[in-house]
Amino acid sequence: MKYEKGVASRKELPIETKDLGERRVLFTISKEVIDRDGDILRANGCDLTNYLKNKVFLGFHNSRDFPLGKTEDIWIEADRVKAIVYFPPIEELSTNPEQASEKAKLVDFTYHCYKTGMLNAVSVGFIPLEWTESEKGFDILKWELLEFSAVAVPANQDAIAEAVKSFGLDKSVIKEYFTSEKSLDEKLCDVEKELAEVKQTVARLTKKLEDTEKNFVELPDNVVELPNV
């Protein structure tokens, strides 16, 4: 994966989780290991400044929808970035728990998925600031954390689908977060292909315009336009 300074990127990572009780889960959201792209995120290069202004835990980087949890604490520990996320219970999100919204149920469902280990991945949204390139990939020395999100990969999709039934959740609500037909990498690849096609189209139109300008012959000054009849 190629990086551009100041341009947001994402990494889907298997993580370590630990249920701390009282609806709190300890996440190791990043550690210094080479990922499947051959890249490595250096923990001591993580800039948390802007993330600390809005410490939310999202679903699939969907910043336009409600968060799934609230990050109560986040810090760098040796070669890892760790965070404690609080998942509010249905009682806190509903005036009438017996008629809780699907989204309130989804927050509860997400907590239990991580608590039981059904989910064991997050996706980190970040801006690369400084890096070096190697034969295998990129060593990202400095990066700004934008957010981190719940994702299903590499969790078992079938197991999640069965759990949705047991929680009585509307499948359409959960699908957007945990049962996407394409992985994040596949979606990014589709976007890159579309951008490449747009660039090719622009290049063709630009060449056509240049050819038209070359073939354009200016009228001499003594040519008189005929009046309209």
Image (cartoon, rainbow, N blue to C red):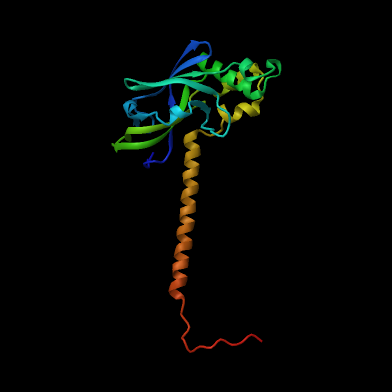
Q: Toward the viewer: 41 or 119?
A: 41
Q: Where is residue 84 in the image (x, y as percent from the top left)?
A: 46, 18
- What residue occupies the far top of the structure in this picture? 21
Q: Can residue 12 be seen in this view?
A: no
- 69 left or right of 166 in image: left
Of 185 and 77, nearer the camera is 77
Residue located farthest toward the front when viewing the structure as drawn: 53
Decide if residue 159 is on the left or right side of residue 126. right
Which residue is located at x 61 percent, y 17 percent? 92
- Residue at point 58%, 31% (across, down): 65
Locate the C terminus by quadrant. bottom right
The quarter of the rendered structure image containing the N terminus is top left
Residue 213 in view of the camera: yes
222 or 157, nearer to the observer: 222
For residue 81, which quarter of the picture?
top left
Q: Residue at x 44, y 64 (%)?
A: 207
Could you tell whether 172 is left or right of 223 in the image? right
Q: In this view, does 199 lie above or below 180?
A: below
Numbered circles on residues, count: 0
Q: How far across and down, in percent of the image, does residue 70 sit?
A: 51, 22
Residue 43: where, in percent of width, then height?
A: 34, 26
Whether 101 is drawn above or below 215: the answer is above
The residue located at (42%, 31%) in the rendering is 50
Percent across and percent down for residue 87 are 54, 18
